[in-house]
Each structure stands twice: as structure tokens, then as C-alpha cells.
Image (cartoon, rainbow, N blue to C red):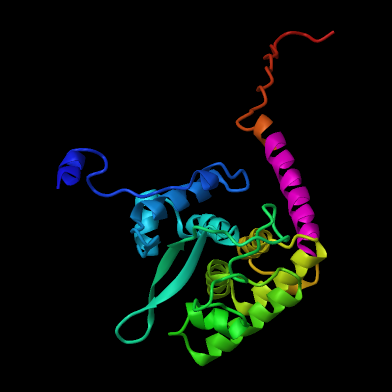
Amino acid sequence: MSKLVQFKGTIYEKGYGLIAKTVVKDKNLSLGAKGVYSYLCAYAGSDGQTFPSANLIMHELGITKKTFYKYLNEVVTYGYINIEKIRDKKGKFDNNLYIIENVVPMGENLPHGKKSTVENLPCGKNVPTTNNNIYTNNNSSSSSSSKEQLSEVYKLYQELGFGLPNSVVAEMIEDDVKKYSKEWFMEALKIAVKENKLKLSYVEGILQNWKRNGGMNNGKAGDKNRSRSMFKNNKQDNRKKENEGKWTGFKPATPKIEEIDTDTELI
């Protein structure tokens, strides 16, 4: 009881958590990723588990959905947090269950020597070993046609060398497919491979350019060539506007005409 009274009126009154110094000092993590990790630690109980909704996290941290999943993906990839899906009373997947890992699996694929937690989850946890499993863990309420479409996307994502997407990346891919279409996303993956940019952020950049320019030009030209063409056209337009701006509002002086006295004899 004395301990509870001691926290009354302090910043610890609403709860507190335990944050590992190893994570805070990890230079492979961005500042935002450490912020998301710290937030989840503050909410976690003595068992190292917590399940705040994504909307609550985004609201209290003041970040967008895309930013949240970007940072969350970092701590999941480096093995500091594992994610399981919670089912509601009807059996549908509800919130995520975030598990703070005390021991991070070691390997040779990542800077720390850590492998993705997708490949190293302890027994009994939902390991997404196939494309369909990844999809099921994130989209159980979707239609069968949507499942088939996403299954094709996940398969191509792996075949092109992007790797096996964890649950966070899988949700980001699903959002992109819904926003831009399966055809656009798969074509953007192929272009990213041609440019040797095997990053989801690069793929999303291609999709954003296509949406901004009204289409993907049937995928005949690489995104780099389109970008160069756009840059050249924009540069020419800017020069034209700049030259036009110099003479905007300019009016030539009216020539002064002297009157001639018609009564004066001309010599």
C-alpha cells in the first residue's frame, strides 16, 4: 500500500514500464522506432504483453498509420517485439498482442546478427510460414477473391527477392494493394527489382508517382526514365514561367509625336 501512495501525484501514477537499455542504445533503430518500443513497454504488464489498438497508439504518439507501421516494422524485424493476433468472441481477429521479447534470437542475416522474428518465433506462436498464413493472420474477414489476389502479391514479393514479409509488412502491402490495385503493385515490384531497390518504400514511391501522373503508362518504361522525363519537362516549364514573369505587366512607352504647323512653309 505504501508503494501505491508513494506514486500518487507523480508521473508514475497512471502506470509505467520497463525499458531495456540495449534497445535504446541500438544504433540500427531509428528514433521513431525506439519511441514506439518505449510506448509499448510503458503499457506492458509484468508478463511483457500489451494490446493497445493501433488507432490509440497513432493518436497518442501523433503519427500516421504509415509512419506507425514503418517504426513498428523496425522493432519487429530486429526481434525486440513479437506480434500475435487476438480473436474476439466471434472468432475474428481483433487487436494485436504485442510481446516484449527478453531474449532476441541470433543469426547472421541482420546487422546485429539477428534474424527476423517471423522466422524465429517460439513454439506455440502464430508463425506465418506461407503466404496464405500471412494473409489469414491479417485479413480473415476479407473475401476469398481478395485473399487470392493478396496471395499472388505475397508470392511475387518473395520470388523477386524482397523476402518473407512479417505481419507488419503484410498489412502495409495489403493497404497498398487496396489503395492502388494488385496490378499496379505487382508492376511496381518488378520495376523496383530492375532498379535494384528491394525496399517497400521504393515500391510505394513508384505507386505514388503513378497516381500523381494519372497512370503507370502500361509499365512499358521504367520509373527512373519517367522521373527523368518529368524532371526535364518541369524544368522547361519553370524556365518558361520564369521568362514570362520578367515581362509580366510591362507596357512599351507611347512614342511622342510632335505636332507640325501646317501654316509653316516647308523648305
Side of 151 where 43 appears, left or right: left
Q: Is residue 130 above or below residue 113?
A: below
Which quadrant of the view contains residue 249?
top right
Side of 4 where 11 appears, left or right: right
Q: Main secondary structure of the magenta part?
A: helix
Side of 229 where 257 appears, left or right: left
Q: Position of residue 89 (x, y in %)?
A: 29, 84
Q: Position of residue 253 (x, y in %)?
A: 66, 22
Q: Position of residue 142 (x, y in %)?
A: 46, 85
User: Which residue is rendered at x = 59% and y = 81% of the image?
Assistant: 150
Magenta stretch: includes residue 233: yes
Q: Is residue 90 above or below residue 265?
A: below
Residues in magenta?
Answer: 222-243
Residue in front for this viewpoint, 204 or 18: 18
The C terminus lies in quadrant: top right
Side of 12 where 188 appears, left or right: right
User: Which residue is rendered at x = 26% and y = 40% of the image?
Assistant: 11
Which quadrant of the view contains residue 180?
bottom right
Image label count = 0
Is any part of residue 247 visible from this angle? no
Q: Is residue 13 above or below residue 156?
A: above
Q: Position of residue 223 (x, y in %)?
A: 76, 62
